[in-house]
Image (cartoon, rainbow, N blue to C red):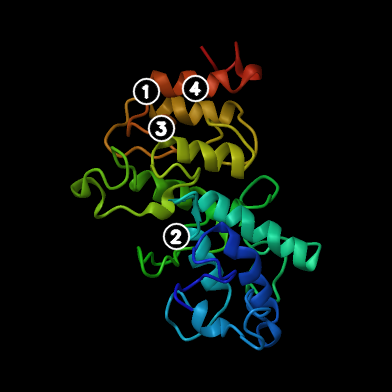
Amino acid sequence: MKIQGDFNVDGDRDLDDIAPMLAALQNPRTFESADAAINPGNYIIPEILGDFDSDGNFNHLDVRYYADGLALDAGSLNRKQGFVEADTEWAALTSPGNFFFTDTTKVPSATTLITGTYAAGDARGDVAGNTVLRGAQPRGQDYVVNHTDIEYVRANFYSGAWGSNLDNHFDKDLSADMNGDMVVDNADVVEIVENILDTQMGDLDLNGTIDCGDLTTLGVNIGLASGATYAQGDLDGDGNVDNDDMAIACANCPTCSGTCCP
């Protein structure tokens, strides 16, 4: 094989390789390459073609590695779609089940959410909790999406398009890109809170709803600056807790009007 990860043998490494990659993971001894009709008996060796982290194995960590940083969509990395494809393609192979959530025969622990219902691709939000090794070994996941992941994303905000200014990006982790736009900013925090955890910006304790407890916490913390966290009330990602954050929370909590909102 000319390109590591090219499981469908089309000369590219992209989202289309995820389905055959998972088929190879499911049954590596009988997986036959896509060009077997041209070259009978031409078998891929998954342990070589799919060992992206160079640990000598082809396993769930390699699928995660691929979804996280190798699966291209029209020439651009889209890790959101990479995780979605891995979950949905595995469900098609095994039915029912998402790769990163329900099938513990290949994944040692299901990815869970602090709140909300798991949907295909939600494991992309699990980027922190263990020692993070950027780039070659993106293994920071601890199998739960929670505040730790939100703060890791916030710590990797950067300005400008990826690659436009290496001084801005050399110490940042593109694994924090949750929405697949190759930028890490507050939109990725919104992606975790609203689209992965199924709640709203302003749910500071991530219990699934915004209530007066959240607004009280935010109000007490107004004035915090330089490193305020999401749990403390920094909703717009500027590092401060102020009236702008209160406005976001109150807009997302109609029942709080007249009680705990101005």
Q: Earlier in the sequence, mark 3 or mark 2?
A: 2
Q: What residue is pinned by disc 1?
A: 242
Find residue 41 and report its horizontal and vertical position in percent.
66, 89
Position above or below: 146 against 222: below
Point 26% across, 55% down: residue = 171
Q: Which mark is residue 234?
A: 3
Of circles 4 and 1, which is in front?
4
Q: Secondary structure at mark 4?
A: helix
Of circles 4 and 2, which is in front?
2
Amino acid carrying label 3: it is Asp
Q: CA distance from mark 4 to mark 3?
A: 10 Å
The tally of labels here is: 4
Q: What residue is pinned by disc 2?
A: 69
Q: CA distance from mark 1 to mark 3?
A: 8 Å
Q: Earlier in the sequence, mark 4 or mark 2?
A: 2
Q: Which mark is residue 248?
A: 4
- Badge 4 density bin: few <14, some 14–19, many ≥20, Cα 10 Å: some
Q: CA distance from mark 4 to mark 2?
A: 32 Å
Q: CA distance from mark 4 to mark 1?
A: 10 Å
**Does the rendering let one see residue 199?**
yes
Q: Secondary structure at mark 1?
A: loop
Position above or below: 161 against 31: above
